[in-house]
Structures are given as structure tokens and as C-alpha cells.
Image: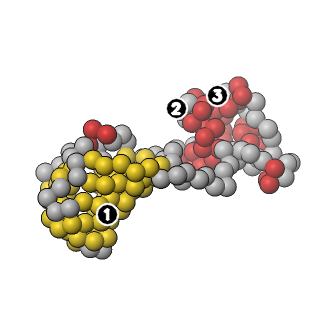
Amino acid sequence: MTNNREQRWDFGVLRQLRRQLDWSIADLSERSGVAASVISKLERNWNKAELETLYKLSQAFSMNLSDLLALAEKRTAQQVAEQDYCSDGFSFRRVSYGNIRCMTASAPAGARLCKPSVHKEDSEMCWVQEGVVEIFVAGHRYKLEKGMSLQFDALLDHEYNVLEDCKLIITHLKKNKRF
């Protein structure tokens, strides 16, 4: 068994994926063609995995090998610099990681933003820090004041209308991803 501090990969994620599908180790073994004893040792990080083994396991979960490796990669921290940009009267400051984008936004009364086409499989959350904003989501109107928030599927048609100068926190979280 290797020291966990020296490991770069944590294949305990195999257990998590397996349990999400309500599979036993035997089920995964049958679907992947990988011996149950190998899967058990991988889940406990007692073995180093061969690339072919990981490929077979990723196929059993209907995912790319690179996605499985990304889930198993152990990172203690990741640092990025913010990006500033403007769109339709809104000023944004954004940080982005593989599974989440977090933005602060400010906009004057009367600003409107409607760009659902930029979204992929995201959930969106808007939290009003100052002012008042009206958000239309799939034909429903939500009026948010300071301290209120709204979460919705970002693929739905949606539009932001600023009723009073506002400051917002907006997040886009990719669906079916872990932190």
C-alpha cells in the first residue's frame, strides 16, 4: 500500500460512481471485464492502475478515460486570476474553474441581459447584493431584492432586467460534476 500523501490519484471515485448507479463490485467487474479483486484494490488505492484497466472502467461508466482521470486526480488547491469584461451594460469580474464559474456583476437601472446561448449543461444562481433585478425564466417572472437569490437551469430561456442599480453574484455550476 502506498502512502496517501504521495499519491496523485484517488480511485475511491470508482466506489462513488459505482454506488451512484447502485452497482456492486461484481456488477462493475461484469460490465468492464476487470477482475473484482482489482477493482476492490483500486477503490482503496492499494494498487496502481494500468491504462487499459482504467479505459475499461471508464467505458463501463459511459465516460471518457480523461473524465475518469480528472475525477480521480487529487488536487489540494487551484488558483486562477479574475477576468474582467462587459456585456449589454453589465460589468463582470469572473473566476472560472473546470466545473464552476463565479461572477460579480454590476449594472445600472435599465440594463438588460439575455444570452442563454452561452450556457451549456449549467445550473445558474443569482444572488442580489444591492439593488433590484427582475429575472424571467421560461416565461416566469421573479423579482429579486437585496439578499434574495434564485437558482435555475441555465439552458432555459432567461433574461435579467435591472430595475435599480444592482450588484449581483452569479454562479454557473456544471451539472453532474463534483467539486
Q: Could you say which quadrant of the image residue 103 lies in? A: bottom left
Q: Please tell me whether residue 12 is drawn above or below residue 120 in the rendered image.
A: below
Q: Secondary structure at mark 1?
A: strand
Q: Please tell me whether residue 79 is drawn above or below residue 55 in the rendered image.
A: below
Question: In the image, is 43 to the left or to the right of 65?
Answer: right
> Residue 165 location in percent, x, y?
21, 66
Residue position marked by numbered label 2 in the rendering: 62
Question: In the image, is 103 to the left or to the right of 88?
Answer: right
Q: Earlier in the sequence, mark 1 or mark 2?
A: 2
Question: In the image, is 31 to the left or to the right of 129?
Answer: right
> Residue 54 location in percent, x, y?
68, 32
Residue in view at x 37 percent, y 60 percent: 104
Spatial CA span between label 1 and label 2:
37 Å
Residue in view at x 43 percent, y 47 percent: 174
Spatial CA span between label 2 and label 3:
10 Å
Q: Amino acid at mark 2?
A: Ser
Q: Amino acid at mark 3?
A: Lys
Residue position marked by numbered label 1 in the rendering: 168
Q: Secondary structure at mark 3?
A: helix
Is residue 71 visible in the rendered structure shown here? yes
Between 79 and 89, which is closer to the camera in this rendering?
89
Q: Could you say which quadrant of the image residue 17 lies in? A: top right
Q: Secondary structure at mark 2?
A: loop
Q: Amino acid at mark 1?
A: Leu
Give the number of the disc on residue 56.
3
Between 33 and 169, which is closer to the camera in this rendering?
169
> Residue 35 location in percent, x, y?
73, 33
Residue in view at x 74 percent, y 45 percent: 8
- Discs 1, 2 touching: Cβ within 8 Å: no
Mark 1 neighbour class, 10 Å CA radius: few under 14, some 14 to 19, many 20 or more: many
> Residue 62 location in percent, x, y?
52, 32
Between 47 and 158, which is closer to the camera in this rendering?
158
